[in-house]
């Protein structure tokens, strides 16, 4: 179990997946994956469809319980914590498919998220927004994510690009120290892409980011470290230059990826 | 105060029509004393509907067994008056407490599963309570109902009269106080986390909301309020019968919410007024077949839509112009 104790030289590792195995019946979706996310990293996780990227995210966020292995967040074993407890410890994710509160407005959504984050989630005797700090933080987030002009519309009527921005704004409202971005630009039309890319590029430097993405332009412009996953197994990892020139990666991933992109 | 705070606080501000509505409600038993009994009943059923709205409209948990809490609150209050002491307010507190306890226990049955499984589980809890009340006849009087419930005067001063004036004011006051409490609750950060769970449970978890704990809290609260409504019912009628637990009560209260609108506390009250007055009016004309007309009304309501039904002047306009207005 404790084959990977936390060494002093790894002090900068904020999130560590150690020997994760996930079996569904006879299928091994994640096969002995070890991954270390360093503080302030821009770490991309890539791999062809079916490589087990989503399973890995679900293991890290606690939606799934690993068959073997453990997950350490800032020195604490969180393997058996519920999803919401991991969020309270500073690890927050976004979703590949928008997961929003459709009947609420962006303002209400962010106000409730910020309130929950500030520990006001059980406060029942005060109206939402009475707290000055919540209101100020909402203003700041709405400005940062270009949502101020639509802040009072119900979320389900917003344009896709705005919904995508809100998807990421919600995660940032939790003030994560570790942020898992699951294909942030998926499905965003070209015209609305720039706003989104700017906000991703402008993420606070001390937030450690794990990015899952198919878009190679974004991956190579964003990441300073990359992990390649194939068939549930870690193929290789390293700097973007190393990955781009790795013949193995070219063979199994980039070749297919390019075809899919242009098809 | 920034623009954001102003926008957020707008939702919780009292609208001018709200005090008017409550003043009318409190004037009603004096203005039409002959109808005090039905006013009392509307207040009780309205409170029951509002409690269902907490879990159905605000949290998205469907229930076909909400009468379990109504009935338990009712029986607890009636038994307390008969066996322990006749003070109505203490009895009301006992009714609320007992129902809330059952609500907390039952909340564990609705934490998982789909709408369909929740419908089945809540229906099952309702049936269990009904049959328990039937079987434990040494305590509850079984199918004959609990006789001989005599209530003491309210606050030691106001005797319950046969016309139901005291009863109507008692129920209206309890309704108002609980309504104001719940109004506060649904507009608070806590209430917002309930709406988040209703809209998207997965995301609610992903922003750190302990979903199961919230479900337990709101289910307990809703059960307590339903228990208050049940207690008011047995206290003001001086009688508890199996009818309190019957399936039709759970179904009626859901219809009332559908009529008035879910996710809006006044919806339960509006639905209760419409439903009870329709029932009263129709059963006077056609005592045997009034449910036919209620059924027809519901079908029309759902097909035409509440918004359009309330605006007769839009009925014969083209849909496009009605759409542009919305």
Image (tube, coloured by chain):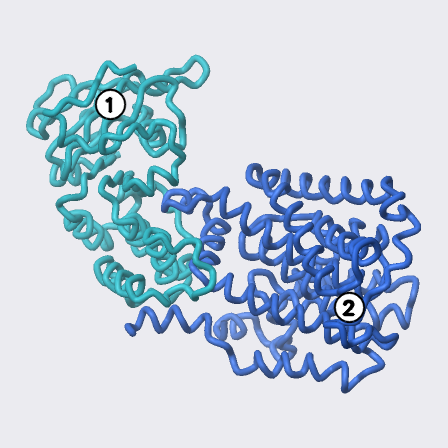
On the image, the x and y values in percent for residue A149 come to 29, 68
Q: Which residue is mark 1?
A: A229
On the image, the x and y values in percent for residue A67 come to 39, 18
Q: Horizontally, is A103 left or right of B75 in the view?
A: left
Q: Horizontally, is B200 left or right of B54 in the view?
A: left
On the image, the x and y values in percent for residue B295 come to 78, 60
The circle on residue A123 is none
**Image colour assigned to chain B:** blue
The circle on residue B41 is 2
Q: Horizontally, is A210 left or right of A60 in the view?
A: left
In this orientation, does residue B179 appear? yes
In this orientation, does residue B251 appear? no
Which of these two is toward me, A200 or B212? B212
- For image coordinates 55% across by 40% down, the residue present is B111
Say which quarter of the image contains residue A145: bottom left
Residue situated furthest bottom in the rendering: B31
Badge 1 crowding class, 10 Å Cα cut-off, few under 14, some 14 to 19, many 20 or more, is many
Does residue A237 sit above or below A142 in this rendering? above
């Amino acid at each position: 179990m404790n084959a990977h104790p936390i060494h002093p030289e790894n002090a900068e590792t904020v999130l560590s997946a150690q020997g994760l195995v996930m079996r569904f019946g006879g299928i091994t979706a994640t096969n002995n994956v070890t991954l270390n996310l360093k503080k302030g990293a821009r770490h991309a996780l890539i791999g062809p469809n079916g490589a087990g990227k989503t399973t890995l995210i679900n293991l890290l966020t606690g939606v799934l319980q690993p068959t073997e292995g453990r997950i350490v967040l800032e020195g604490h074993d969180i393997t058996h914590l519920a999803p919401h407890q991991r969020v309270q410890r500073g690890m927050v994710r976004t979703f590949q498919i928008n997961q929003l509160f459709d009947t609420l407005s962006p303002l209400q959504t962010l106000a409730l998220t910020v309130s929950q984050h500030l520990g006001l989630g059980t406060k029942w005797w005060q109206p939402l927004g009475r707290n000055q700090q919540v209101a100020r933080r909402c203003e700041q987030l709405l400005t940062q994510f270009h949502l101020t002009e639509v802040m009072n519309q119900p979320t389900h009527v917003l344009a896709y690009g705005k919904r995508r921005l809100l998807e990421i704004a919600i995660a940032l409202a939790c003030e994560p120290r570790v942020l898992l971005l699951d294909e942030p630009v998926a499905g965003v039309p070209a015209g609305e892409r720039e706003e989104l890319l700017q906000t991703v590029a402008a993420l606070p430097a001390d937030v450690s980011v794990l990015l899952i993405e198919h878009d190679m332009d974004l991956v190579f412009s964003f990441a300073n470290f990359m992990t390649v996953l194939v068939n549930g197994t870690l193929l290789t990892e390293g700097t973007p230059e190393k990955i781009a020139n790795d013949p193995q990666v070219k063979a199994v991933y980039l070749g297919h990826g390019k075809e899919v992109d242009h098809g | 105060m920034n623009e954001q705070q102003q926008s957020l606080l707008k939702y919780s501000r009292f609208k001018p029509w709200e005090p008017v509505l409550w003043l009318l409600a409190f004037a009603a038993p004096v203005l039409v004393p002959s109808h005090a009994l039905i006013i009392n009943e509307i207040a009780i059923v309205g409170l029951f509907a509002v409690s269902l709205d907490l879990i159905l409209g605000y949290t998205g948990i469907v229930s076909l067994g909400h009468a379990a809490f109504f009935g338990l609150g009712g029986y607890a209050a009636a038994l307390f008056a008969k066996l322990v002491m006749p003070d109505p307010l203490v009895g009301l507190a006992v009714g609320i407490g007992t129902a809330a306890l059952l609500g907390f226990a039952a909340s564990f049955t609705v934490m998982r599963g789909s709408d369909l499984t929740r419908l089945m589980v809540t229906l099952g809890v309702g049936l269990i309570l009904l049959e328990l009340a039937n079987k434990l006849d040494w305590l509850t009087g079984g199918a004959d109902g609990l006789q001989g419930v005599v209530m003491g005067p309210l606050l030691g001063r106001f005797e319950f009269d046969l016309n139901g004036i005291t009863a109507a004011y008692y129920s209206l006051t309890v309704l108002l106080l609980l309504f104001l409490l719940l109004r506060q609750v649904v507009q608070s950060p806590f209430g917002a986390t309930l709406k988040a769970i209703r809209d998207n449970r997965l995301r609610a978890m992903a922003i750190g909301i302990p979903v199961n704990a919230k479900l337990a809290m709101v289910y307990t609260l809703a059960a307590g309020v339903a228990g208050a409504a049940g207690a008011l019912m047995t206290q003001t009628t001086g009688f508890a019968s199996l009818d309190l637990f019957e399936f039709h009560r759970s179904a009626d209260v859901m219809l009332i919410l559908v009529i008035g609108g879910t996710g809006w506390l006044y919806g339960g009250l509006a639905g209760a007024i419409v439903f009870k007055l329709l029932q009263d009016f129709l059963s006077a004309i056609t005592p045997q077949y009034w449910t036919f007309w209620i059924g027809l009304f519901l079908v029309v309501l759902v097909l035409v839509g509440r918004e359009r039904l309330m605006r007769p002047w839009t009925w014969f306009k083209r849909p496009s112009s009605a759409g542009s207005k919305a």
